[in-house]
Amino acid sequence: MSTEAMKPIFYRLPADLLEDGMSTDDGQDILEVVRSPEDGTIFYLVFTPRSDDPAQHESNQTDAEWRITKSGAIVDLARFSDTGTDGSHLPEAVVLDWGDFPPTADDSLDAAA
């Protein structure tokens, strides 16, 4: 696989479009999405995947935690090489273009000034 294919894509998406298998921008995988019929609150169950350690991966799934947001709220997501569901291609997605990220040691914060 090429290096370009391995680069993560960071994007924002309305919470109403969250799906199982997406990844949050902080590296969590979404296991389940539940929408409240009463008020539109969206609950999504996340865990830290560990493909390098199957026992830890299973433990992390067992200890998954719920996140809560409102319908219409914007959620920061990412597409990593192991993300199951990529929403960055959806028309509602806003892909964040940070250029070459992460910066290399040669990059200077003063260069942009």
Image (cartoon, grey):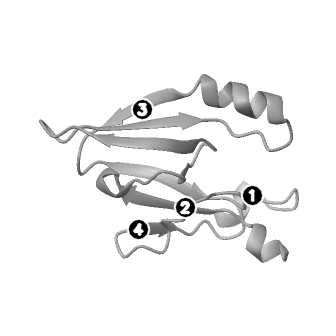
Q: Is residue 32 above or below residue 74?
A: above
Identify which residue, 21 or 3, lies in the foreground: 21
Instruction: Determine the secondary structure under disc 2.
Output: loop
What separation in Å lies between label 1 and label 2 (alpha carbons)? 23 Å
The residue that mark 3 highlights is: 67
From mark 3 to mark 2, how far is it between C-alphas? 18 Å
The secondary structure type at the circle numbered 1 is loop
Looking at the rendered structure, which numbered label has been put on residue 85? 2
* Residue 89 falls left or right of residue 40: right
The mark that comes first in sequence, 3 or 1, is 3
Q: What amino acid type should be assigned to the residue bearing mark 3?
A: Arg
| Of marks 3 and 4, the one in the foreground | 3
Who is closer to the viewer here, 83 or 74?
83
Residue at coordinates 72% horizontally, 68% vertically from top-left?
Answer: 100
Q: CA distance from mark 4 to mark 2?
A: 13 Å
Does 62 sit above or below residue 70? above
